Amino acid sequence: MQEPAAGPPTPASGLTAPFTLTRLTVVRHGQSTANAAFADAARTRTEQTPLEGRDADVPLSGLGLTQADALGRWLGGLDPGERPQLVVCSPYARARRTWERMAAASGTGGGDLPHAVVDQRLRDREMGVFELHPPAAIAARAPEEAARRARLGEWFYRPPGGESLADVVLRVRDLLHHLDRAAVGRRILLVAHDAIAVAVQHVTAGIGAPVPDDLPPVPNASVTRWHGDGHHLSLTEWAGTGHLDEYAD
């Protein structure tokens, strides 16, 4: 099993945010059909046209379904005292389907797992007018926006009608503090997106944490975990994917 990937550093001088949660885990959804299409476009360097439909409705790919099953076997392999007591899902179809497959593949029969609740604050970063546009399509259709994105960087770039990663942090901060008050001392699992994992790390790093210059990768179906001591949350695993090999079919 591979070692957990190292996470982004937390500054020693930061004012760490108080949290009572015992465990906090963020699972990124399995590969979606959009993830696969974007990867193909990047690999072939084609200016693929935007995908049809809404981002919220994009389903898992065949690989994504398999990854979600592997996540379920990982979940079932946890000691009962390590399993989540509360599951909160993004409203997006790919995240909700990931949890459904996880629960079904866990081998617990669902009896030891909580029912998931859905919260809009866990939705993926909104890209506004560029919804479901591969990067190459943005560059081809709106080169001035692509240049502005490169100049500002992902943390601060806000597409027309959409969000920057800094905007995502604001709603994630609100959700985390809400959960901390509503679920004191509990183990919580968030099933969401890569932007959510990055936002959670930035919030838990505390006031004064620097904006990451190079955003760490958060692969599909990866697991990121924080452990709590009753006062603060500390990152213990960043975007781990060892379970995808260990629990593969």
Image: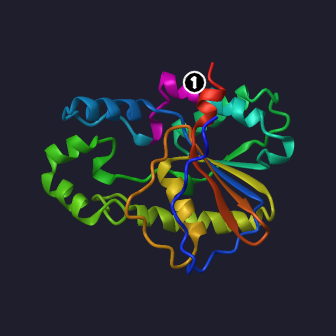
The answer to whether residue 115 is left or right of residue 47 is right
Query: Going by the picture, which residue comes out furthest to the top?
Result: 249
Question: Residue 184: x percent and y percent?
Answer: 80, 65
Residue 111 screen position, x and y as percent: 85, 34
Query: Does residue 64 show up magenta in the picture?
Result: yes
Snapshot quadrant of residue 23: bottom right
Q: What stretch is highlighted in magenta?
A: 56-67
For residue 52, say whether it is visible.
no
Residue at point 33% right, 53% down?
128
- Residue bearing the label numbered 1: 66
User: Can see residue 153?
Assistant: yes
Q: In which quarter of the image is residue 66?
A: top right
Which residue occupies the foreground of this view, 249 or 27? 249
Q: Main secondary structure of the magenta part?
A: helix
The answer to which of 89 and 18 lies nearer the viewer is 18
Residue at left 35%, top 57%? 162
Q: Residue at x 53, y 34 (%)?
A: 30
What amino acid is labelled 1 in the image? Thr
Q: Residues within 10 Å of mark 1 (few under 14, many from 20)?
A: many
Image quarter of the C terminus: top right
Instruction: Tell me: residue 181, above or below residue 126.
Output: below
Q: Residue at x 64, y 36 (%)?
A: 99
Q: Is residue 166 left or right of residue 82?
A: left
